[in-house]
Image (spheres, rainbow, N blue to C red):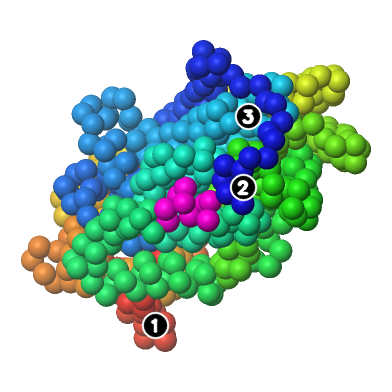
């Protein structure tokens, strides 16, 4: 069998060019509203995003676009594409005016990657409508929204990390590959491999592995290896991917040597796959619940779409005889299974690892637009009723928020429960989901894409009028105090005076002060470490000096949370309290008193630990 099989093709409604343009403009407007509305109105969220943002800004400030660096140390955890894109944003003029919090430049790569993913999903379904779909424009919009409204996508698309960029570049590459195969012409086969190179420059070889598993599964199911091979030209394609992506890896290895090899390939890739790192131990079935949450409340539709694909796989010959243009749902099933299989096999598991599967899940949800067979009609009805039930349960849980919000206890956000209750935002969210249930159930007798859109409309409203304000409230409670104390650091710091943060460690302090920060925990060893590091540690932008040196600062600025400050070994140091914000205090601490206390602790048997290797150190 070949990609351009002569099997009869059921009639489909193909939108005109004008209809496609209108559909794409609507998807673009929705994408910009969902992902870019008030994107830069809140500060960076600790702990990981400030590390990415600081690395990107450092590239723009130093002109070193090869090695990402944060807080004076190389950052080898991710390849450079996300840092390059952030750095380009920080290099734009007048950033203090249009981006005073530094978050537009940091978050825009994630947001735009999700915007492009929505457009790619919509364009694919407009140009290659599903078999028997009478409303392809509605299906295209519904699929794009099914991706955008995933709880994981809503969160990570507004987060300054590399996960959304990987999801977007991988999705664009895989969709280009399927379209090349479906067209039967093999035109622009090289485009998918160029985009795959960007995915490799975003998060490393995992992009190639996921692509390979997806294509192998799809070729095996279709029994059309020759058709795929002819259309995609994988050997030439992988060469293109390598020519674009490998030069940075080679240059970084040449400049940084063994530390880069051990950290990036050893720790952040191989070790994450084969052993648990950073205490991210999860059971083997971890991604089952993640699959459920990631598409909620449309998970029943996803399971129905996935079940229909699996049933087609089991059907064998009848499925294989279908033209390549009718295989998008099956390709999405292989795509989703590739993510599931790879990361289930990995020892380290995180919810964000599921993000590359969310575009495939959106296609499977949209595939419920296909007319069901007689045997499937009951299952589809159950899926829709289950979706209504899930949405109703979610609305009920939000309405019951006065019962569970007071149970939220976070020492970093002690006022959150009271402020969240007073804001009324949770009730506003509940109203959005109630409207979704009412509109969705009322449209049960309409076309399936229209029904899905009726459900999705109020959820778009939820994002704009409830979720975004909740993010702003969380920023005010959790992150604003860090920015306030950072402002005091900038105003109070003397020339050459070192800066430390003790107890609750917030990389955003480094970002907003633009100073190297010595981070230590709250233990006795942390106090001893701090004194020793101020005398001996060397990193870019910071040279520790013994207090006896002429150029050494006699004092150190310390940002410490009140819980840590109350511990006995931090008492009696007679600090000068310069400012406070939220749970944080800013001290000016005499280093001679600090060193005396550290010497007493060492005499009591407390050992220094700061020189031990820590791959996640900053």
Q: Is residue 21 above or below residue 258?
A: above
- Of the 4 image quadrants, the one containing the C terminus is bottom left
| Residue labelled with disc 1 | 607
Residue 541 in the image, given as x and y percentages of width and height: 19, 57
Please report the residue visible at 28 percent of the width from the left and 56 percent of the height from the top. Answer: 243
- Left/right placement of residue 509 relative to residue 293 reads left
Determine crowd level at label 1: few under 14, some 14-19, many 20+ residues with C-alpha closer than 10 A: some
Numbered range of the magenta stretch: 226-234
Q: Position of residue 158 (x, y in %)?
A: 49, 37
Q: Earlier in the sequence, mark 3 or mark 2?
A: 3
- The residue that label 2 is drawn on is 331
Quarter assignment of residue 396: top right
Q: CA distance from mark 1 to mark 2?
A: 56 Å
Q: Is residue 113 visible?
A: yes
Question: Which of the marked residues, 1 or 2, is nearer the chain's N terminus?
Answer: 2
Q: Which one is closest to the eye, mark 1 or mark 2? A: 2
Q: Residue at x 68, y 68 (%)?
A: 284
Viewer-nearest of discs 1 and 3: 3
Label 3: few (<14), some or many (≥20) within 10 Å? many
Residue 344 horizontal/vertical position (percent): 63, 64
The residue shown at (57%, 42%) is: 4
Q: Nearer the viewer, residue 135 or 535?
A: 135
Residue situated furthest front in the rendering = 6
Residue under the point 63% across and 40% down? 6
Residue placed most toward the observer, 515 or 216: 216
Horizontally, residue 248 falls left or right of residue 292, namely: left
Can residue 121 be found in the magenta stretch? no
User: On the image, numbered disc 3 is attached to which residue?
Assistant: 129
230 sits left or right of 432 in the view: left
* Mark 1 vs 3, N-terminal side: 3
Kindly identify which numbered label has been placed on residue 584.
none
């Amino acid at each position: 069998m070949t990609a351009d099989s002569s099997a009869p093709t059921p009639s489909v409604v193909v939108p005109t060019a004008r209809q496609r343009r209108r559909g794409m403009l609507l998807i673009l407007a929705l994408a910009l509203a969902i992902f870019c509305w008030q994107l830069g109105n809140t500060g960076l969220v600790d702990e990981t995003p400030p590390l990415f943002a600081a690395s990107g800004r450092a590239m723009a400030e130093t002109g070193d676009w090869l090695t990402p660096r944060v807080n004076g140390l190389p950052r080898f955890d991710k390849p450079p594409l996300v840092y390059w894109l952030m750095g380009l944003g920080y290099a734009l003029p007048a950033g203090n005016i249009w981006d005073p919090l530094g978050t537009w430049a940091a978050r825009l790569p994630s947001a735009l990657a999700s915007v492009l993913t929505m457009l790619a999903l919509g364009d694919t379904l407009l140009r290659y409508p599903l078999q028997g779909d009478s409303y392809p424009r509605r299906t295209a919009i519904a699929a794009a929204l099914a991706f955008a409204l995933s709880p994981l996508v809503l969160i990570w698309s507004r987060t300054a990390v590399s996960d959304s960029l990987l999801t977007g570049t991988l999705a664009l590459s895989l969709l280009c590959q399927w379209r090349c195969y479906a067209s039967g012409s093999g035109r622009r086969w090289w485009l998918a491999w160029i985009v795959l190179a960007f995915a490799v420059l975003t998060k490393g070889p995992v992009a190639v592995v996921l692509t390979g598993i997806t294509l192998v599964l799809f070729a095996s199911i279709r029994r059309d290896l020759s058709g795929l091979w002819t259309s995609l030209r994988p050997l030439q394609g992988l060469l293109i991917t390598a020519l674009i992506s490998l030069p940075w890896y080679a240059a970084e290895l040449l400049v940084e040597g063994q530390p880069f090899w051990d950290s990036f390939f050893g720790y952040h890739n191989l070790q994450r796959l084969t052993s648990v790192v950073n205490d991210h131990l999860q059971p083997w079935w971890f991604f089952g619940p993640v699959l459920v949450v990631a598409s909620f409340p449309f998970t029943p539709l996803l399971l129905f779409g996935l079940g229909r694909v699996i049933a087609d796989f089991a059907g064998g010959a009848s499925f294989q005889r279908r033209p390549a243009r009718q295989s998008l749902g099956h390709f999405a099933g292989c795509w989703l299974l590739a993510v599931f299989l790879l990361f289930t096999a990995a020892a380290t598991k995180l919810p964000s690892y599921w993000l590359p599967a969310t575009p495939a899940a959106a296609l499977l949800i949209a595939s419920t637009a296909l007319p069901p067979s007689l045997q499937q009609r009951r299952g589809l009805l159950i899926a829709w009723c289950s979706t209504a039930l899930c949405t109703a349960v979610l609305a009920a849980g939000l309405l019951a928020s006065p019962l569970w919000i007071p149970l939220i206890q976070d020492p970093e956000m002690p006022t959150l429960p009271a402020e969240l209750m007073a804001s009324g935002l949770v009730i506003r969210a509940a109203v959005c989901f109630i409207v979704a249930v009412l509109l969705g159930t009322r449209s049960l007798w309409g076309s399936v894409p229209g029904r899905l859109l009726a459900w999705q409309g109020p959820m778009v409203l939820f994002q704009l009028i409830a979720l975004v304000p909740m993010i702003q409230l969380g920023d005010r409670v959790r992150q604003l105090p860090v920015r306030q104390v950072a402002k005091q650091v900038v105003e109070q710091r003397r020339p050459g005076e070192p800066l430390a943060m003790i107890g609750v460690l917030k990389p955003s302090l480094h970002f907003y002060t633009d100073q190297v920060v010595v981070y230590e925990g709250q233990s006795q060893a942390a106090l001893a470490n701090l004194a020793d590091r101020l005398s001996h540690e060397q990193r870019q932008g910071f040279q520790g000096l013994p207090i006896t040196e002429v150029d050494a600062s006699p004092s150190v600025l310390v940002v410490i949370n009140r819980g840590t400050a109350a511990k006995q070994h931090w008492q009696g140091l007679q600090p000068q309290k310069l400012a406070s914000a939220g749970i944080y205090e800013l001290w000016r601490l005499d280093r001679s008193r600090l060193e005396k206390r550290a010497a007493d602790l060492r005499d009591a048997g407390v050992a220094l630990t700061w020189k031990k290797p820590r791959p996640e150190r900053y």
